[in-house]
Image (spheres, rainbow, N blue to C red):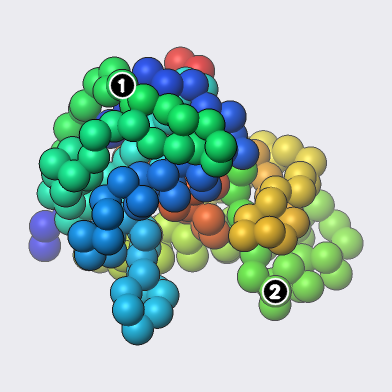
Amino acid sequence: MQNNLNILLVQFSNPIYRDEIPAFRGAIVNALQDKGADLFHNHKEEGLVYRYPLIQYKRIHQKAAIVCIGEGTEAIGQFFSACDFVVNIGDRPLELEVESIKPNKVLVQVWDSIFSYTIRKWLPFNKENYEQYTKLESLAEKYAMLERLLIGNILSFGKGVGIQYDKQVECKITEASEPMSIMHKGVKLMGFDVAFKSNVSLPDYIGLGKGVSVGNGMVKRMESNKE
């Protein structure tokens, strides 16, 4: 079983606002000039492709960034060959400048040790489990449900990148913000900033939950937090 996962972080020097991430994603997709690079937008002629996004658009250190995962690390070459690096983010023209390109190979698996993470702007709910959550009265029940949803997100991430965990995945939420409203596809959803511990080694900057292609649910190991 091969659990090594290729990750490529493309960091630009251009600052963007958090609410510009969807427009940044759209600008990159438009720059590809319909070259059929569906990994960049998860659409094909027959409609939406339901899979874990292997190219994710982020705001890291307040600057535009692209995180490429697995097959996405090879597909990013289509962008570099097709784009003249002049894009429009909404009505704002922007000449993208690459600050760094950092390849990494991460061993994603269950360990006997525990890792500490933060996850920002995490959107854990669908309609059904949101209704279940709002009916819970105690904080302990709410934390327990959020932990189950986070484990589900980690399992879905593994399945989406072709990784199987050979032991039980564990998560413990150690801190959670007050619920916040986050706009996603024109709808306000309940989200959280969370600190958690898990026995799974997760790559920095990958997303968990809903809306990961536009920066929601971004994970960072706490030992390497510098932001």
For discs 1 and 2, the disc positioned in front in the rendered view = 1
What is the residue that sits farthest to the right in this orientation? Answer: 137
Q: Position of residue 133 (x, y in %)?
A: 76, 66
Mark 2 neighbour density, 10 Å: few (under 14) some (14–19) many (20 or more): few
* Residue labelled with disc 1: 97
Mark positioned earlier in the residue sequence (1 or 2): 1
Question: CA–CA distance between discs 1 and 2?
Answer: 40 Å
Residue drawn at x 68%, y 59% is 186
Q: Quadrant of the N terminus?
A: bottom left
Q: Nearer the viewer, residue 214 or 52?
A: 214
Mark 1 neighbour density, 10 Å: few (under 14) some (14–19) many (20 or more): few
Answer whether labels 1 and 2 touch (C-beta < 8 Å): no
* Residue labelled with disc 2: 127
Q: Amino acid at mark 2?
A: Lys
Q: Position of residue 130 (x, y in %)?
A: 73, 68
Residue drawn at x 36%, y 70% is 43
Question: Does 185 appear above or below 199?
Answer: below
Label 1: element kind? loop
Label 2: element kind? helix
Residue drawn at x 35%, y 45% is 28
